[in-house]
Amino acid sequence: MPGITPMDAPRSTSDDRPRAPGNIDQLCINTIRTLTVDSVQKANSGHAGAPMGLAPVAYTLWQEVLRYDPTEPLWPNRDRFVLSCGHASMLLYALIHLSGIKRLKDGKVTNEPAVSLDDIEHFRQIDSVTPGHPEYGHTTGVETTTGPLGQGCGNSVGMAIASRWLGAHYNRPGHTVFDFNVYTICSDGDLMEGVASEAASLAGHLGLDNLCWIYDSNTVTIEGHTELAFDENVAERFRGYGWHVTNISDANDCSRTRATLEEFRETKGRPTLIIVNSVIGYGAPDLQGTSKIHSDPLGAEEIRKVKAFLGFPEDKDFYIPDGVLERFREGIGQRGAAARAAWEKNFRDYAATYRHEATQIERCLKHELPESWASALPVFKADAKGIATREASGKVLNAIAEELPWVLGGAADLAPSTKTKLTTEGMGALEKTTPGGRNMHFGVREHGMGAIVNGLGLCHLRAYGATFLIFSDYMRPPIRLAALMRLPVFHVFTHDSIGVGEDGPTHQPVEQLASLRAIPGLVTLRPADANEVSEAYRVIFTLKDTPAALILSRQPLPIFDRGKYAPASGLARGAYIMADDGGEPQVILIGTGSEVQLCVAAYEELKTRGLRARVVSMPSWDLFEKQDKSYRDTVLPPRITARVTVEQGSTIGWDRYAGPSGAIIGMHTFGSSAPLKDLLKKFGFAPDKVVEAALRQIEQNKAS
Amino acid sequence: MPGITPMDAPRSTSDDRPRAPGNIDQLCINTIRTLTVDSVQKANSGHAGAPMGLAPVAYTLWQEVLRYDPTEPLWPNRDRFVLSCGHASMLLYALIHLSGIKRLKDGKVTNEPAVSLDDIEHFRQIDSVTPGHPEYGHTTGVETTTGPLGQGCGNSVGMAIASRWLGAHYNRPGHTVFDFNVYTICSDGDLMEGVASEAASLAGHLGLDNLCWIYDSNTVTIEGHTELAFDENVAERFRGYGWHVTNISDANDCSRTRATLEEFRETKGRPTLIIVNSVIGYGAPDLQGTSKIHSDPLGAEEIRKVKAFLGFPEDKDFYIPDGVLERFREGIGQRGAAARAAWEKNFRDYAATYRHEATQIERCLKHELPESWASALPVFKADAKGIATREASGKVLNAIAEELPWVLGGAADLAPSTKTKLTTEGMGALEKTTPGGRNMHFGVREHGMGAIVNGLGLCHLRAYGATFLIFSDYMRPPIRLAALMRLPVFHVFTHDSIGVGEDGPTHQPVEQLASLRAIPGLVTLRPADANEVSEAYRVIFTLKDTPAALILSRQPLPIFDRGKYAPASGLARGAYIMADDGGEPQVILIGTGSEVQLCVAAYEELKTRGLRARVVSMPSWDLFEKQDKSYRDTVLPPRITARVTVEQGSTIGWDRYAGPSGAIIGMHTFGSSAPLKDLLKKFGFAPDKVVEAALRQIEQNKAS
C-alpha cells in the first residue's frame, strides 16, 4: 500500500496558523483565474465563472487548511476535497497543477505532474486528463466524479461517514490513524437538487462535524438570477437539518474564509455550511455577475480586460508568474508533507503494536479478501419450498460481513424487507454516537443513499445500499456514476417483479432490470435460488473495480437440487446450462431469477413427454457477454433456434437470446395489485405456459 | 364536459363554520379506522397504522373543509386531495366510500359508488378498484397515483400552480372560475425524499397559498423510530423554504385541526405546512406507536381489542354504524353540492359573457385541439447544414403554444440550452406575481419538475418539462408514473448523445434511450431532422392519454430534402422507409436521430457503387410496435437479413431490428470529453463505418 507506513497524534491546528494574504497569495489566486479563462477560451467551451469567483476561497482552503500531500495522493488520511459543482473543473485542475500533485499510474505515484500545464492547455480535448467535468480514476487529485449536480454533496457525506467509521474502528489511544475532514464546494444547483437535501439531512442527523460544505452563492444560474427559481433561506433550511451555518460575505476576503474554516474545525457535533457570497466571473469587467459568464467562453477582448484588471500581462496565455509554484510548495506542499510524515511515523508504531488492525487496514485499502472469506459462503440444501432470495441474501451477506470487517451498508428504511441488516453481535447501528456501526439507516432517501454509498466506496469501504428494485429509479444517477468511476459498491434490490403482489403496479418493477442492464460497466445479477445468491456474492466481492446490482425476490423460490442440476457456480459466467439430458436439445428454455423454476418445471414436463429441452439459468447478461464466443455458443448454440425466454420484466433486449423466431415471455404492461397467484395467472407466468411455448417452438423448428 | 355549467363568486368560508365534534363525528372517524383494520386483515396485507392515526384529521378536512361534490367528481374547480403516503390507501378508500363519491365510467358519472363496501372487502384483490396504492384513472376520487414516496407532494405543487394559472387566465371580475385549493397528506417518508424537498422549495418560491401539506409526524418508519434516521427540525426547514408552518399537537383534537385549516386559508402569499403529531395505529392497544403496525395486519385478537376500544361490535366486520353515511351526506355532500351548484350558476353567466374563454376551458379540459393548430406546424426547407433538432423543437413548440393557450412548461435551469422557452409576447415567466406565465423556471430540480408536470397534467394543462437527456435519470419515477396514469404530458430531452461533446461522459447519455423505451406506455421519439421534429409534435399533441419523451440533438443536423426522400410524416408510424430505389434492397440501414444522416450518406455512397440499400428512419420503437404486422414487414421485410442499425446509445434492444446476423453500431462504453468530431472518430460513427458494415452484411448475406 503506497504511503502506508505511519502517522500523527491527535490532529493539531498549529501548522494551519492564519497568515496575512500578501501579494504573492493574490498572485496565486489570480493565476487560477487566468488559467481558467485561457483554457475555457482555447477549448471554446467550459465554465469560467465559478472558478473566477471562488478562486480566493478555494486557494485559502487548499493552501492553509487542506491536509494533503501533493507527493502522495494516496495517503489514506488525507483530507478529501470534493468539487460538487463539477462544471467548475478548471478550478480543480488549476489547483492540482499549481499544488504539484503527482500523477498516479497503475496505482503507483510517479514523478509526473497529475495535471501539467500542457494538460491545462488541452482542457476538454480528446484523451486529456482535463475533461469537461472531473473524473475520478482518470485524473489524480480528483476524489470523485462530479458534474451531475448534487452528487458530490452526497459523496462527501459518505466520505465523512467513512472517516469516522475508520477512526472508530482503527484509532487507538495515542494513534489517530483516521480523522480526515471532507470539504465540498457546491453551487446553487447542487443545493436545489433533492439528492443534496437528502444527504444534508442525514449528515445533520449523524452530526458529521468533519464535513464542511462551502456553498458558492453567486446568485446566477443558467436561466438567469436565482431569484427566478431559488430564493429560499438556505441558512434556515440547513439549521433545520441540524447544521452549523456561517458565512463569508465577500469571497475575496481571505481572512474571513480563514476564520470560517477555523470555525468549522471548532464546531463539534454538527456539520458546517459556509455560505459564500461571490461574484460569478469576478475579474471580467463586462460579464461578471451575469449568466453569460456561467458557461460561455469570455472572448479575446474580455480576457484582455480580465488580465489588465488582475495585473497580468495581456499578451501571455497560460501564464504562471514567478513565485506562484514556490508559494504552493511552501503552503499546501510543506504542510501536507509534514502531516503525512508525522502520520507515517505514528502508523509505524501503530502497526508494530496493533498488527491485526494494521493488516485489516491494508487489506481494506487494497480491496483484498482474507483467504478464509470464501469458505464462509453458505451452501443451501435443496428444498422444494425454498426461501426467498432476499432471505438467502441476508444469510450470505451476514456470513461475509463476519469475515470482512469493512463491509457496511443499509437500506432506505426497508431493512426488515430487504433483509440486509447485519445481525451479528457488535454490528449495531451506525449513528451519531456509534460511528463504527455496520448498519446504516439511510431513511427514505434512496438517491442520497446511492451517493453516500459511492462516498463510502471512494474511501475503500465495501459499502452497499438496499431498497425495493422499483426504487432503483430514484437512484439511477449515483448507480451510473459508480459504474463510470468503477467503484466496487453494490446494491441489494429486492421485491423484483410482480412477485411484489398486493402492493400493485407502483411497486412492481417492469422496466428496471432492462434499465440497469443498459448501464455500461454495472454487473446486474438476478439469481434463481439461494445457492445462486451465494455465488452472486462470491462474484460481487471478487470484483475490485465494478459495481453490482443484486436483484432478489420477495417470494420464496425453490432451492434446486444441485446433484440433479448443474452447480450454482455456473453463475460466475453469467449464464450456464442448468439442466440438459445430453443429445441435441430440441428447445432451450432460458430464465432468470424466479422464472428459472418455471423453466425447470417445464423441462421436467417435456421430459415426461419424451422431448429434450435444455434449461439455461441466466442470472447476468453482463457476465455472459464477457465470456468468449465458444462458451457462449456452447450454452446457446446458434443452430438451436427453438428457444423460450422467461422473465417477469420488460422484454427489451431478450431478442438477443431468444433469436428472431424464439418466444419471449415477459411483461408488456405495468403490473397490478393482487395476491401473487392471481397475478401469475393474469400475466401468464406458469410452467404450462412455458411448456406451450416450448411445444410451439419445437413444432415451428421442425417445420422450418 | 360533464359538470361544466357554472359556479360561485369569490370563495366564501361561511359554509365551513366550525362545528363541535359530536358523537356522530367520532363514530365516523372510528368507522374509517375499523374499515381499515378489517380490510387489511382480510387482505392479509396493507398499511393500517397511518389511516388509524390520521382518521380524525382527514375526516375533519373532508367533512368540513374540502370543497368536493361527491356526485360530480369531475367538477373542475373541486379542491384536490392528495394522499402522498399512498400506502395509507385505506384512508382514502374509506373516505371515498363514506362520502358517497360516484363512479366514473368512460368519462361519465354513473350512479354506482366509486368504492362500494364490497370493493373495500376486496382491498388489494385482482381487478378491484381498491389496489394496494391509489391509482388515478382506476378509482374515481383518486386524484393522483401515489405510493412511491414524495411524488404526491410534487404533484400537489403542480396542481396548486395549475389552479392559480387557470385562475389567472380565466377568472373575470365577479366570475371566479378557478380557485381550488390543494390538500396533501404526507408522511415522514415523503418529507425525507428529495423530490418533496425540491417541490417544497419551488412552492415556497412561488408563494402557493392555495397549497396545504398535512404532515403526519407519527415518528415511526419501517425500520423503527424516526430517531434512527430523521430528526431534523422540519418546521425550521420549511420556514427556510418560505412556508407558513403550524401544528396539531394531537391528531385526535379536531378543533385544532379545524383551526389550522382555517389558518391555512387565511395565510396569504405562502404555502402552509401543518405538522400533525399522531399515534400510528391509534386505537390498537398493543401495537399503536410501533413500527409493527406500519405495514402488518393486526391479527384477529388485536382487532377485537381495537373494536372494543372504539366502542364497535367486536364480532362485526366492515361495519358502518347507522348515521355515519348520513353524516357524510350532510357534511361534505351538502357543502360540495351547494358549492358546485353556485359555481355552475356562475359559470353559465360567465360562458354567456366570455364565450371565447369558456370554449377554451372546455377544450382544455377535454384535451381538444382547435382545428387550426396543425396548420401552425412549421415545415422546414431542406438544408445540408441544417439546424439542431433542439432548435427546431423551439420553433415548433412556440408555434403550437400560440395556438394552444394551455401549453406551459419549462426547463430545470437549462431553457437557453433546451430551447424550450416560449418567446411570443405575453408568454412571460410563471412567477409568484405572474401566476399565468407560460414559462416555468423549475430550477435545478429535475425530479421535482417531473412530479410538478404530472400535477399540471392532472389538472388538464398540456405541460412539459425539459432538461438534458442524461438528467432524465434524475426524474424517472415521475416519468414512470405519468405512463402508469396515462397522462398526456411530455418532456423535451436535449443533448442526446456523445453529441454533447466536451462536457464529457457525465453528461453524455448512453443508456438513457434504452431505459426510456423500456417504460411501458411512454412514447419515446428521436427525430432525425427538423421536419421529423414537427411531426413528432403532431404525434405528441394528438395523444390524449400517453406521455412522451422527445429526444433531441445538441448539434446541427441536416434537414433532408423531402422531395428526394420520403416525407417526415412517416414518423407517426414509428419507422418508415425514407430512402429506397425500388427493387429488393440488398441491405437495410436503420437509424434514429442524428444517425439517420449517416445512413443516408451511406445509402448514397452504396448507390454510387451500384448497390441497393434502404434507409429506415426509426424515430420511435413504441409507435412502430403499435403498427400492424403487415406494415412492419413492409418496412423491415423478415427475408432481408442484411441490416445495419446505427444509434449513439446502448445497443440493448437493437437485436430485435438488426436480427441475429445484422450489424449493430452503438455505444458499448461511456463516452468521453472532447470535441464532437474527435468523439465520432473515437466511437466509430461515420458514413464510411456504416458503408463498411453494410458491405460486410451484403457479403455475408450472399454467402449464406
Image (spheres, coloured by chain):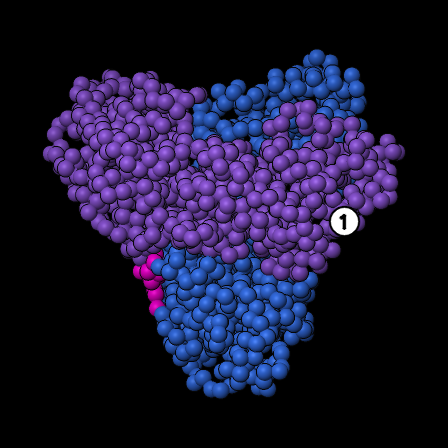
Chain colours: A blue, B purple
- Residue B525 drawn at (x, y percent): 59, 40
- Residue B31 drawn at (x, y percent): 23, 25
Q: Is residue A521 visible in the rendered structure shown here?
A: no
Q: Is residue B383 visible in the rendered structure shown here?
A: yes
Q: Which residue is mark 1?
A: B687
Farthest-out residue, right: B703
Question: Mark 1 — on which chain does it sit?
Answer: B
**Vertical order, A118 against B106 (above or below):** below
What residue is at 78 percent from the left and 27 percent from the top? Answer: B639
Q: How many marks?
A: 1
The quadrant of the rendering that contains the N terminus of chain B is top left
Depth check: B329 or B594 in front? Answer: B594
**Label 1 packing within 10 angstroms: few (<14), some (14-19), many (20+):** some
What residue is at 62 percent from the left and 82 percent from the top? Answer: A315
Residues shaded magenta: A232-246
The image quadrant of residue B574 is top right
